[in-house]
């Protein structure tokens, strides 16, 4: 069974909480009527979940700082400060973006940059975002109402609100219209989809990078090489005459020749080795980290294959004939627990034979029948789902965070156990989703590596995004007008 919803880009800006919390968005009310959106995900480090907006019970000083972190001066008449292709960016948009940034920095007790530097940065971000939104429209990307509702629901839950209606009330209390808020959220979702589409093909993560990342994050010891060898020692007494040393070397050469010819190494060790107990044990030295073997032994067997006989090699003790019995990389990882979700879905693909609207209507009917007890989820999945999981009743198994595309993951995370979602639209089609269980699970080494791979992809995605954003910005025609104030 395959999982078609393979994780792609986890840097979904609207899910960070930092940009789209109601308090932060209250500062975006632009009188120009233009929809703006934050390029918060263009930071050098990957976006991480931020704390929800400060509640009304925060200390008075902090609340006052959040309301008016820096005085922007009297509000001037609006004017165009730049044109991106044919679309204007206005002074009031820049001021609104500055106010939002100042609000967020005040909430985090961050030092405010000089006004002129902040003004220039916000203008450049608006220009870059405007170019990206225009590119998204050229590519035919759209955000339907169901995706918008899922995004709003996630924002509500991040801010400890129990419904979208409560979120809208909070938005209005902060002085922003619901329409402006929803337009901004829609732009965020659109930009996230565009970035996912454009950046995903650029990402490559190697196995070596994954292992190094796990050890860096967990503090685990670096991977070590373990060796097991057998040894036959032909001892050379200290200050032996040259003739005696040569005779002993010849004996060691003969033992090595016989071992290479296939004679039993352990029997040869018992007969010829001067290594006391080791000789009686067949010469085996035991599996141990390479750094616990003499450097001479490690260097001598470095290019040997398991089973090869090496030597004789000379040390102060005499001549050693070595056989490499085992070589393995110790990649043991520490125990890690992570929440997992057992999820099923029904997928209807969209295309010339089935429009998105028709697929959504069919899914809504499936949900109605399931909720009314007229049909089972598994039964409908087997009959109708256009996914490899259909034969298993839509079962996608236990999933780790970040395994699915953002739209699917949002909807899944918003569900209670055994609850069926409303129709969810992703780039794969339209889904119904049901969560069958949640648990914390100790990850196997392979699962740890998959999770680390996802995190590394997210981290690399940020660097790729910076490059991609510069490319989009470079293709746009930008004309600067009177500067913002």
Image (tube, grey):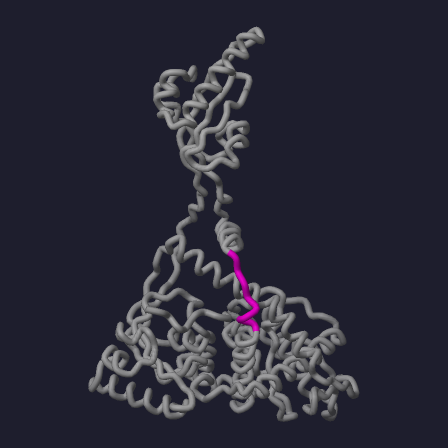
Residue 74: % across, % down: 73, 87
Regarding residue 21, the answer to whether it shows in the image is: no
**Residue at coordinates 36% horizontally, 24% vertically from top-left?**
266
Vertical position of residue 192 compared to residue 448: above or below: below
Quarter of the image with the C terminus is bottom right
Can the viewer see residue 249? Answer: yes
From the viewer's perspective, is 438 left or right of 425?
left
Write the start and end of the magenta stretch as one range: 199-206
Q: Residue furthest left?
A: 374
- Most foreground residue, 393 or 131: 393
203 horizontally vs 347: left or right: right
| Image spot of residue 389 (x, y percent) | 31, 73
Residue at 61% x, 66% y: name it: 463
- In the image: residue 369, left or right of residue 198: left
Closer to us: 179 or 148:
148
Residue lying farthest to the front in this orientation: 261
Reply yes or no: does residue 41 show up in magenta. no
Q: How many numbered marks does the figure carry?
A: 0
State the residue at coordinates (29%, 90%): 365
Residue sitting nearer the eye, 379 or 84: 379
In the picture, which quadrant includes the N terminus? bottom left
Can you say whether 278 is above or below 141 in the image?
Answer: above
**Identity of the residue drawn at 65% across and 70% down:** 467
In the rendered image, residue 93, in percent from the top left (x then y), is placed at 67, 86
Which of these two is toward me, 147 or 56?
147
Residue 443 in picture, x, y percent from top left: 38, 56
Q: In which quarter of the image is residue 364?
A: bottom left
On the picture, is 86 further left or further right than 136?
Answer: right
């Amino acid at each position: 069974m395959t999982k078609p919803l393979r994780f792609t880009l986890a840097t979904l800006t609207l899910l960070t909480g930092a940009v789209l919390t109601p308090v932060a968005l209250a500062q975006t009310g632009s009188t120009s009527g233009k929809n703006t959106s934050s390029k918060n995900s263009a930071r050098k480090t990957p976006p991480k979940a931020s704390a929800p907006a400060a509640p009304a019970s925060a200390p008075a000083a902090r609340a006052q700082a959040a309301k008016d972190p820096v005085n922007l001066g009297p509000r001037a008449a609006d004017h165009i400060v730049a044109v991106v292709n044919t679309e204007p960016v206005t002074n009031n948009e820049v001021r609104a973006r500055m106010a939002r940034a100042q609000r967020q920095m005040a909430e985090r007790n961050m030092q405010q940059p000089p006004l002129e530097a902040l003004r220039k940065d916000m203008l450049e971000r608006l220009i870059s975002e405007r170019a990206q939104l225009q590119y998204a429209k050229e590519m035919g990307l759209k955000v339907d109402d169901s995706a918008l509702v899922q995004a709003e629901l996630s924002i509500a839950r991040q801010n400890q609100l129990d419904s979208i209606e409560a979120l809208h009330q909070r938005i209005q209390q902060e002085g922003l219209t619901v329409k402006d808020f929803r337009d901004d959220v829609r732009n965020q979702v659109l930009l996230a989809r565009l970035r996912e589409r454009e950046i995903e093909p650029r990402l490559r993560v190697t196995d070596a990078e994954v292992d190094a990342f796990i050890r860096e994050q967990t503090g685990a010891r670096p991977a070590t090489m373990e060796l097991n060898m057998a040894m036959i020692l032909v001892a050379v007494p200290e200050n032996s005459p040259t003739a005696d040393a040569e005779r002993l070397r010849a004996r060691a050469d003969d033992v090595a020749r016989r071992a290479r010819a296939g004679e039993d190494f352990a029997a040869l060790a018992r007969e010829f080795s001067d290594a006391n107990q080791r000789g009686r044990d067949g010469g085996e030295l035991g599996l141990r980290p390479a750094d616990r073997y003499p450097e001479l032994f490690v260097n001598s067997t470095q290019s040997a294959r398991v089973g090869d006989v090496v030597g004789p090699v000379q040390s102060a003790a005499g001549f050693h004939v070595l056989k490499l019995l085992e070589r393995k990389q110790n990649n043991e990882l520490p125990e890690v627990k992570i929440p997992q979700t057992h999820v099923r879905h029904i997928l209807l693909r969209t295309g010339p034979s089935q429009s998105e609207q028709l697929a959504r209507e069919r899914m809504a009917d499936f949900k109605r029948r399931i909720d009314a007890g007229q049909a089972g989820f598994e039964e409908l999945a087997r009959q109708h789902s256009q996914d490899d999981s259909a034969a298993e009743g839509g079962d996608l198994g236990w999933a780790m965070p970040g395994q699915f595309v953002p739209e699917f993951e949002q909807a899944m995370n918003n569900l209670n156990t055994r609850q069926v979602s409303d129709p969810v639209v992703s780039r794969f089609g339209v889904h119904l989703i049901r969560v069958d269980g949640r648990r914390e699970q100790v990850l196997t080494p392979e699962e740890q590596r998959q999770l680390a791979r996802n995190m590394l992809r997210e981290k690399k995605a940020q660097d790729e995004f910076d490059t991609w954003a510069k490319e989009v910005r470079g293709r746009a025609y930008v004309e600067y007008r009177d500067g913002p104030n």
